[in-house]
Amino acid sequence: MVHADAANFASDLSKEQVYDLVLLQAESLMSDQRNWVCNTANIASLLWHAYKSLPEPSSHVNWAGFYTLDRSDPSGKSLILGPFQGKIACQAIAFGRGVCGTAAQTQKTQLVPNVEEFPGHIACDSESKSEIVVPITVDDPNNEGGRKVVAIIDVDCAVENGFDEVDAKYLGELAELLARSCDW
C-alpha cells in the first residue's frame, strides 16, 4: 500500500526527477488497482503536489486532472469531467472543442503556451494562461490496428509558457501507463 507521503516531493529536485518520481509512484499506486476512477483520482493529486514542489512556472499550475470518454453519449465523441485538483471545471466537452476536445479528436498532445491564442479555447478558469492536454488511448476493437481515446490528462497553468517538451514527454509516458493499468 502506498502512503499519502508519496505525494511529498523535495523542493530541490529537477522537473525530470519529479516526473520520474511521479511515474514510479503512479505505477506503485496502480499495481493492485485497475479501477480508472480510483487511479485517476490518486494521479490527479499526485500531479498537483508534484507541480507545487517545482519552481516557476510549474508551481503556478492551477488545475490538474482528467476528462474521460462520456459513455452516455451515443456518438462516443464527448468527454465528461473526471477526478481533478483545482477550481470547479466544465462538466462536458465535445471532441474537437477547445484544447481538450482537440486532443481527444486528434489523439495528439496539445501544448498551448498561450490559451488566448488557441482557437475556440474554453475558459473554465479565467486565471489559466497556458495548458497541456495529453490523450490516453487504448486499442480499439472496432477499428483494427486503431486506437480510441478513453480519457485525457489536462493541466492548466496561471502563467503563459507554463509547459514545455519535458512536460509533454513525461505526461505522455503517464498516459501510456494509465492506458495499460486501468480497466477503461
Image: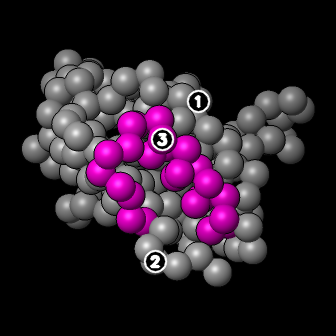
Few, some or many residues within 10 Å of mark 1 (<14, 14–19, 20+): some
Q: Which residue is mark 3?
A: 17
Magenta stretch: includes residue 24: yes
Badge 3 or badge 2: first in the primary sequence: 2
The quarter of the picture where the N terminus appears is: bottom right
Measure how far apart labels 3 and 2 are at the Cα level: 19 Å
Q: Residue at x 20, y 18 (%)?
A: 117
Badge 2 or badge 1: first in the primary sequence: 2
Q: Secondary structure at mark 1?
A: loop
Residues under numbered marks 2 and 1 in contact, where contact means CB atoms less than 8 Å apart: no
Amino acid at the residue labelled 1: Gln
Determine which of the numbered discs, if any, sits on residue 107 in the image: 1
In the rendered image, residue 7, in percent from the top left (x then y), is placed at 42, 66
Amino acid at the residue labelled 2: Ala
Badge 1 or badge 3: first in the primary sequence: 3
Magenta stretch: includes residue 17: yes
Measure how far apart labels 2 and 1 are at the Cα level: 32 Å
In the rendered image, residue 78, in percent from the top left (x then y), is placed at 49, 48
Measure how far apart labels 1 and 3 are at the Cα level: 27 Å
Q: Secondary structure at mark 3?
A: helix
What's drawn in magenta, residue-wise?
A: 7-30
Placement of 27 over or under 61, stated as above or below:
below
In the image, which is nearer the foreground, mark 1 or mark 3? 3
Q: Which residue is mark 2?
A: 4
Q: Nearer the viewer, residue 117 or 143?
A: 117
